[in-house]
């Protein structure tokens, strides 16, 4: 194990050095995105918006670690557990030094933290033109390896240290933690805010769900406001107030780059180009004329609460089914966080299926809070849960599927979706490497 850790540190150090040299040579503009909720969706929304007019590259999937960020800079994919693949990546990246390539003018990089120092180390060598912070919830995901919540918050905020002197911070105005930590008038850098509140520079109003004639939800509509300018936006195939934040953040980035661009033009580009990443509250057609909300990419207490809130607001007369896996890396908050979800589930859903070791607390609390025990089921693995769910689904059911990536809840969606032939494009974690796990 010590040898494996040593090799990883050596590879990381080499790739970071190569990335710094490349950035110094090509000098692209850099947008970095962090937070505890919505990083990938925000990064992708920024990419889809800016790709219309800029030569831009984004982080692949969730390449947001000390390894992932340099890999994006170097335009390389992970070598996974093969030392030979990593050696090939290191050698291949050298061509960027000795040849003049058409390198992107912009990079949009997702930056995450699993351990203390992850973001601080990245901020020490990466200079950002724009830093986006999405949200800092009360119980952060990945808190397991941190001393407490405060240490997680400080780690996330450390990305602001990477801002250039003329850089811009894009902040969620609705996040109370961010608002309490950063005074936009005396921050020392330019700040553009987004959200639903009146104080936001870019804000969403009049959020509504779009339904079919059969009362099935198919998307959302809302108005985007920038000062005195306001324009409607329609997005199909996704649900949830939290999805709007990613869109607003991307608009704030575009305006911070070029304030002369009109909302009408920005929204037109997003409506044309934006594709919700797999496993992020994507609406999929399920067996027996059911509807799936595929939110299987990952999970955290705040994200589950947002998903439940989205479903509670739906005008849906048929059954609502929650299929929830463990929320991992919560450390001392594990039982408490799962039980809080159980309480909320009991108020919204007709049937509950839980998967994993910790989700039993969701199940127990849902029943204690009033859900009929005959409507609550628990399974140890996603494959078994998916097969049992197949037998339960009825016409008109609305099914939320969500869990941390280690529980592999996308396997359940694969068993209950109708468009199986396109699952590689529609579902997360369909790479060959994941099939071995």
Image (tube, rainbow, N blue to C red):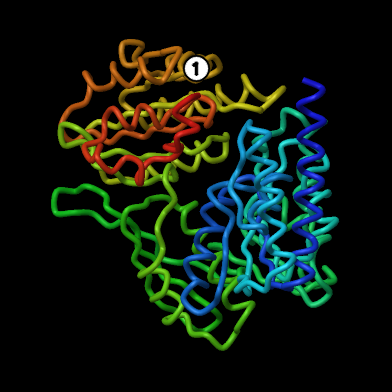
Query: Which residue is outermost to the bottom?
Result: 260
Left or right placement of residue 210 versus residue 165 in this view:
left
Q: Position of residue 285 (x, y in %)?
A: 23, 41
- Where, by quadrant of the figure, is residue 184 drawn? bottom right
Residue in the image at 65% along x and 43% along y: 137
Left or right placement of residue 13 versus residue 335 in this view:
right
- Where, by quadrant of the figure, is residue 385 drawn? top left
* Label 1: few (<14), some (14–19) or many (≥20) C-alpha neighbours in 10 Å: some
Look at the picture and state if 222 lies above or below 243. below
Q: How many marks?
A: 1
Residue in the image at 45% along x and 19% along y: 355
Residue in the image at 61% along x and 47% along y: 63
**Which type of secondary structure does the marked residue at label 1 adopt?**
loop
Residue 424 seen from this side: yes
The one of 296 and 423 positioned closer to us in this rendering: 423
Q: Position of residue 54 (x, y in %)?
A: 54, 77
Look at the picture and state if 333 lies above or below 71. above
Q: Position of residue 236 (x, y in %)?
A: 31, 58
Residue 308 seen from this side: no
The one of 251 and 123 positioned closer to us in this rendering: 123
Look at the picture and state if 270 lies above or below 434. below
Q: Which residue is mark 1?
A: 356
Q: Position of residue 169 (x, y in %)?
A: 72, 67
Please identify the quadrant where the N terminus is shown: top right
């Amino acid at each position: 194990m010590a040898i494996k850790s040593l090799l990883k540190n050596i590879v990381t150090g080499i790739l970071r050095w190569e990335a710094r040299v490349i950035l110094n040579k090509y000098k692209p503009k850099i947008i970095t995105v962090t937070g505890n909720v919505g990083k990938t969706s925000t990064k992708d929304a920024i990419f889809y918006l800016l790709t219309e007019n800029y030569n831009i590259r984004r982080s692949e999937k969730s390449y947001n670690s000390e390894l992932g960020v340099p890999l994006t800079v170097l335009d390389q994919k992970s070598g996974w557990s093969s030392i030979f693949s990593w050696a090939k990546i290191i050698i291949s990246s050298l061509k960027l030094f000795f040849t003049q390539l058409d390198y992107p003018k912009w990079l949009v990089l997702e930056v995450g933290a699993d351990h203390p120092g992850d973001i601080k180390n990245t901020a020490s060598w990466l200079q950002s033109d724009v830093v986006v912070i999405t949200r800092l919830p009360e119980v952060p995901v990945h808190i397991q390896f941190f001393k407490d919540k405060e240490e997680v918050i400080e780690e996330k905020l450390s990305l602001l240290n990477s801002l250039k002197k003329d850089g811009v911070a894009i902040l969620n105005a609705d996040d109370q933690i961010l608002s309490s930590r950063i005074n936009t008038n005396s921050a020392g850098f330019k700040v553009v805010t987004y959200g639903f509140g009146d104080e936001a520079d870019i804000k969403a109003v009049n959020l509504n769900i779009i339904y079919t004639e059969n009362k099935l939800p198919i998307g959302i509509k809302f108005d985007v406001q920038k000062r005195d300018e306001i324009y409607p936006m329609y997005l199909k195939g996704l649900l949830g107030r939290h999805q709007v934040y990613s869109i607003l953040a991307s608009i704030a980035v575009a305006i911070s780059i070029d304030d002369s661009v009109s909302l009408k033009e920005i929204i037109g580009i997003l409506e044309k180009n934006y594709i919700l990443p797999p496993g992020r509250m994507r609406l999929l057609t399920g067996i027996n004329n059911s509807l799936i909300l595929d939110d299987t990419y990952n999970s955290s207490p705040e994200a589950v609460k947002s998903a439940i809130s989205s479903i509670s607001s739906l005008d849906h007369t048929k059954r609502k089914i929650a299929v929830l896996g463990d929320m991992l890396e919560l450390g001392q908050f594990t039982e408490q966080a799962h039980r809080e979800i159980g309480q909320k589930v009991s108020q919204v859903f007709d049937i509950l299926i839980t998967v994993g070791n910790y989700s039993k607390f969701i199940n127990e609390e849902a029943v204690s809070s009033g859900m009929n025990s005959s409507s609550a089921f628990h399974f140890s693995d996603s494959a078994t849960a998916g097969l049992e769910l197949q037998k339960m689904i009825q016409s008109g059911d609305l099914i939320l599927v969500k869990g941390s990536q280690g529980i592999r809840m996308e396997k359940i969606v694969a068993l209950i979706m109708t468009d199986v032939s396109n699952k590689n494009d529609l579902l997360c974690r369909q790479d060959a490497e994941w099939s071995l796990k």
